[in-house]
Image (cartoon, coloured by chain):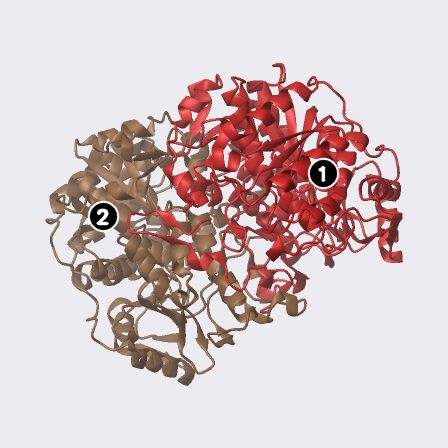
Chain colours: A red, B brown
Amino acid sequence: MSLSNIEIAQAAQLRPIGEIAEGLGIPPEAVIPYGATKAKIALPYVQGLADRPQGRLILMTGTSPTPAGEGKSTTVVGLGDALTRLGEKAMICLREPAQGPVFGMKGGACGGGYAQVVPMEDINLHFTGDFAAIAAATNLLAALIDNHIHHGNALSIDVRRVTWRRALDVNDRALRDLVLGLGGPGNGYPRESGFDIVVASEVMAIFCLATSLNDLKRRLGEIVVAQTRDRKPVRARDLNAHGAMTALLRDALAPNLVQTIEHTPAFVHGGPFANIAHGCNSYLATSSALRLADYVVTEAGFGADLGGEKFVDILCRSTDLRPSLAVVVATVRSLKYQGGVDVADLPREDVDALERGLVNLERHLHIVREVLGLPAVVAINHRAEDSAAEIDALLAACERLGVRASVAKHFAEGGAGAEDLARAVIEECEPATTEPRYTYPLDASLWEKMTTIATRIYGAEGISADASVRAQIRRLQDDGYGELPVCVAKTQYSFSTDPSALGAPEGHTINVREVRLAAGARFIVMICGSIMTMPGLPAQPAAASIDVDDEGRITGLF
Amino acid sequence: MSLSNIEIAQAAQLRPIGEIAEGLGIPPEAVIPYGATKAKIALPYVQGLADRPQGRLILMTGTSPTPAGEGKSTTVVGLGDALTRLGEKAMICLREPAQGPVFGMKGGACGGGYAQVVPMEDINLHFTGDFAAIAAATNLLAALIDNHIHHGNALSIDVRRVTWRRALDVNDRALRDLVLGLGGPGNGYPRESGFDIVVASEVMAIFCLATSLNDLKRRLGEIVVAQTRDRKPVRARDLNAHGAMTALLRDALAPNLVQTIEHTPAFVHGGPFANIAHGCNSYLATSSALRLADYVVTEAGFGADLGGEKFVDILCRSTDLRPSLAVVVATVRSLKYQGGVDVADLPREDVDALERGLVNLERHLHIVREVLGLPAVVAINHRAEDSAAEIDALLAACERLGVRASVAKHFAEGGAGAEDLARAVIEECEPATTEPRYTYPLDASLWEKMTTIATRIYGAEGISADASVRAQIRRLQDDGYGELPVCVAKTQYSFSTDPSALGAPEGHTINVREVRLAAGARFIVMICGSIMTMPGLPAQPAAASIDVDDEGRITGLF
């Protein structure tokens, strides 16, 4: 009987976090412990690393996921451990898991099996408080807006046009749409609003894009929260909110150091959604890791069409991050799903379905190699149920596609199972300075940018939008936001906006349903199809089986 | 020019928290550091202290406060430091400050002047994440309720009778009353609800009353969140929520160790409001401190009529805590306010007003000594503007009242300024085992209990309530909750329910406006008059002047 993730994690022998930091050459005074096995690395130290030479950045991306995900985080851990085993100085960078989904369906998100970051329960619950700080900053800004309106509204904020929403790290559909400020004059002006999950908030995106504490404050001040009655933007700095928000976020901005089960150092820091936001851990974590290690593996959420594209077009464009290689995670399971197999039937061997699903891998490889200009390696994240015939078919396909592939068994075997993948990565990756290609030029119009993403990345014929959305896009263009990159919010399950259109759909049209300005994060969110910014809980939530035993051990987290 | 609280705090030389713990005999493996100057003390260690002999517990209470408060926390710190200076092994226990008010009017709440707990910014902002954990547990339960209703409502919860509210640590009046679940069937069933500030939540009260992790879980399971369509209670355990809530609170339940500017060890842990809840730091913190030190000073919120009464009738009654002495904090300023002086005029000498206000001190002393049966000492918390004539009048009054009084100058001078107070405390306090008197017997009916509190504590003639409230009280009595103590929620500014009725009003009637069952905290909240469970921000919120400077230092916190 195999052990659950939490059982494996709880059985792991962790090293004191000071030792892990020492191994990276971090001086003790820069290590801010949170218990014995977690630490923040002091911001002044982190910011002082900028002059050091950078290691090589390996970007973990993947094919379109099944609803269960395809183990990108797990492969980040496995690859990091394998690089360490091969004697390389390696670090990994991951997003912090959202707490909300832990109590829903997904369970924890710290890798899996023998490829996990630990302490797993801590990282999944509260961790070092970063998400609580991001929620607090978001909600303070919201309170200041309604408070300003209540006390005379000197800025003439149009209560119908307050776009800033509150945030909580919980899966709570009842908070998606609400009317607040009810109960009479003492409680302010009633208006429609709602809560997003923290990982979907603009403050989370800003937190992960900020290059320094000052940059964070500047970006927070730029947030557009509402419009005035004559349609002028109202910014957080107009409410003098950005200083207090920065105070709330100051400690959180220091990267969190933990370790894998095999003691590879890991920064787990920040965690924006890859469908509504840019989907990668904090810039400061990755950037610092590159100054502390020779190889840094980081993850871009969902497939190459979402996190991969955004990593290059949003994150690389605004920072000095330059991936030397992309690892595209594929599983037999996900490709069978792309080939049309129902989730329930995925464990059964089905080489034909796998072959049908290969177009999905091919498209993602095309995005990585042709569009974004990155060398690629395919990591076949092995599962116990994969048949030899399926694996062979997948390996043969990779050969046909001219991409090096490696079967990685880190879930079952830890880093030892991913050594071949690590060797492939070392041999294929380019120097740290390689400039990626961008999907679109920044000086194209917003409409052109979205069209280019739709055609080059999603294989669409073009884009569409209602007159009101077109007008909104034009208005943003006219208001001087035309230079910003576009952050597409769409389903992760398909290149189209229809989650059931699997494989590699072509000729479809991407309809832009809504446009949001993220002036602090500095991108324009184009919402295509329906995207939840606040998840719900399932009929049988995981919360019901999570418990604490008499020894104080947390059980039922999976 | 005198320094602000934050300037004094930031100039303090802190000792490593491991040293502070070592001084208490806490082994290093029980110290869970949160940075260099904060730590949690591991729960198994804390729970293992129970067999040790207890030190003496000094309960800090006070007269009715002015809107600015009268420096009870500051006096706790000053007395603790003075006891340490006199060679006693002393500890202090304080509530964690709520983060919401930090951005409103009140500013920080870690003592003041040279009598502060530090690191002040950290304690005021996030600290070790306890309040975020309490909010998360509260909001997870709320999400599980609405989720249960959404997915078929097997428990037949009456959506009109869901009493459980969400919580956030923010001053946000717009969240007091709202309609959630809007936006169509996918978002659940619309219903009225709202948010309370975390310090007013039942989970906060439970957290502070829990005697162990198991007791915490049991109490969380007992929370009544709603009624069914046939008016049966729905509990958190009916939703299997209490295990997951306990998992969220597990780490938070370990007490937080910090230090005063003069290095006296301090547990700062938990922080329920004293108007809506029982108003004292966690039982576990006080109880552990009593096993680690010979003198432990703790604070009960607001005057003796609120926090003081609840400390005895709620906390002592359900635990082994036994105060050896009560220190009643009085200020010239507060007594002049009680004598009818406007807040703006309080700095001016006015002995007559002070004399008029003395009835307030007299009433509080009566409560402490006659009703609750505790020996008392009056601490005159000295302010720079107090005139010699005012101080003399106050000292003379104390002599008339037969109570030992001491002018304490810890705000300006630190512990050295409170040594005389410390000597008075040592000399007057009784052995640790003294049983307090309770205001009412537990087997009285709920109506009788409330009547007894109103007459004996508030000097009222009796109580009143609408028929519907009377019916609710009867119902609670019939449902088996008649044995619980009563937790009165009322204004802290007056013995009556009218905040402007100063001094020592008599003959008034206390009207019970609303009754709430706190089945997990195990008390019945009787709301008398209007009490906010979610504060608002003022027209000029402190947030606007809080900032982070280029060195990363937080400024503008006062």
Dot 2: what SS?
helix
Q: Which kind of residue does numbered mark 2 sit on?
A: Ser
Dot 1: what SS?
helix
Q: Residue at x 31, y 50 (%)?
A: B282
Between A188 and B375, the one lying in front of the other is A188
How many residues crowd around disc 2 within 10 Å: few (fewer than 14), some, or many (20 or more)? many
Residue A445 figure quarter: top right
Q: Find out whether the residues at labels 1 and 2 contact each other: C-beta distance under 8 Å.
A: no
- Give the Cα distance between marks 1 and 2: 55 Å
Question: What mark, if any, has residue B287 been given in the picture?
Answer: 2
Chain ID for label 2?
B
Q: How many marks?
A: 2
Between B545 and A6, the one lying in front of the other is A6
Between B463 and A159, the one lying in front of the other is A159
Furthest residue toward front:
A389
Q: Residue at x 65, y 70 (%)?
A: B185
Chain ID for label 1?
A
Image x and y of residue B203, in percent: 39, 58
Instruction: Reply above or below: A271 against B214.
Output: above
How many residues crowd around disc 1 within 10 Å: few (fewer than 14), some, or many (20 or more)? many
Between A490 and B117, the one lying in front of the other is A490
Camera-near label (1 vs 2) is 1
Residue under numbered circle 1: A304
Image x and y of residue A281, in percent: 60, 35
Q: Residue at x 10, y 49 (%)?
A: B431
Left or right of residue A558, residue A386 in this image:
right
Question: What mark, if any, has residue A198 been given in the picture?
Answer: none
Instruction: Reply above or below: A199 against B372.
Output: above
Image x and y of residue A10, in percent: 38, 40
Left or right of residue B274, residue A320 in this image:
right
